[in-house]
Image: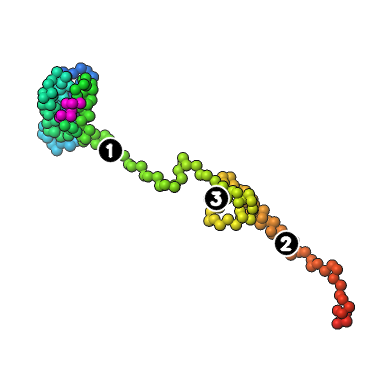
């Protein structure tokens, strides 16, 4: 590609009025802009300058034959339209640009199209070309969502059974066999749970201290007469 003068080729392309002289400005511009992009692709994949020149010639023939077909197809007989489309397909193949339909289908779909629509339809037949592949690479597929996995759009419902048992009995609340208490606590309930645990432990500790410091209960104990006799 180092020997290919792409800028000069593009200039020649736009200066050749015979390519689109059968069309009005808008469809002609659309066709030339598409052709310019194809020129860039031809320059990338051509092995030599001679190879590029050969395909450049075929591209110009392709543009000119499409221009003539668009301008005249409404006045052509159906067999003439099919023959013209076959030529378009041949030039496209020679330029290394695959076409994506049969001549019969293209002729049928072109019947009611004016110039702008006709150009757009013809260019759409090149959807599988190298240019289309480069400009529209495949996207990375979105990984599937595993069933049952909470998402940002899925609200997490509180465990109503746990909340009921919590209201009925503090002991049942404290003895709940869970590995991670935050999984079953309602929103905002963690601090309440910690306070209850702390309060329970503090009360138990104070009760134990009071029991350990309380003197034995000897009030009302009197030795019997039998006890005095033994001593």
Determine whether the residue tagged by mark 1 lies in a helix, strand or loop: loop
Determine whether the residue tagged by mark 2 lies in a helix, strand or loop: helix
Answer whether labels 2 and 3 touch (C-beta < 8 Å).
no
Instruction: Answer whether residue 221 is visible to the viewer in this image.
Output: yes
| Residue named by callout 2 | 209
| Residue at 21% in and 21% down | 112
| Residue named by callout 3 | 184
Quadrant of image for the C terminus = bottom right
Q: Nearer the viewer, residue 48 or 104?
A: 104
Answer whether labels 1 and 3 touch (C-beta < 8 Å).
no
Quadrant of image for the N terminus = top left
- The answer to which of marks 1 and 2 sits earlier in the sequence is 1
| Residue named by callout 1 | 137
Answer whether labels 1 and 2 touch (C-beta < 8 Å).
no
Spatial CA span between label 1 and label 2 = 76 Å
Which residues fall within the magenta stretch? 103-109
| Residue at 12% in and 33% down | 94
In the picture as drawn, the residue positioned furthest to the bottom comes out as: 230
Q: Position of residue 145 (x, y in %)?
A: 40, 45
């Amino acid at each position: 590609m180092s020997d290919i003068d792409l800028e000069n080729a593009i200039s020649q392309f736009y200066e050749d009025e015979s390519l689109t002289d059968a069309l009005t400005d808008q469809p002609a511009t659309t066709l030339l802009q598409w052709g310019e992009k194809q020129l860039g692709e031809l320059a990338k994949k051509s092995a030599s300058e001679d190879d590029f020149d050969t395909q450049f010639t075929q591209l110009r023939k392709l543009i000119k034959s499409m221009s003539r077909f668009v301008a005249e197809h409404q006045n052509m007989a159906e067999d003439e339209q099919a023959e013209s489309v076959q030529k378009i397909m041949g030039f496209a193949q020679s330029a290394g640009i695959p076409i994506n339909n049969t001549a019969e289908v293209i002729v049928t779909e072109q019947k009611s199209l004016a110039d702008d629509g006709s150009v757009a339809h013809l260019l759409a037949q090149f959807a599988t070309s190298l240019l289309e592949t480069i400009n529209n690479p495949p996207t990375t597929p979105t990984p599937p969502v595993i069933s049952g996995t909470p998402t940002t759009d899925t609200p997490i419902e509180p465990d109503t059974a746990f909340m009921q048992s919590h209201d009925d009995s503090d002991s049942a609340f404290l003895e709940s066999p869970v590995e991670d208490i935050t999984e079953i606590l309602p929103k905002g309930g963690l601090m309440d749970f910690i306070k209850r645990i702390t309060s329970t432990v503090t009360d138990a500790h104070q009760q134990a201290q009071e029991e350990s410091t309380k003197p034995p209960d000897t009030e009302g104990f009197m030795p019997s007469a039998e006890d005095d006799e033994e001593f």
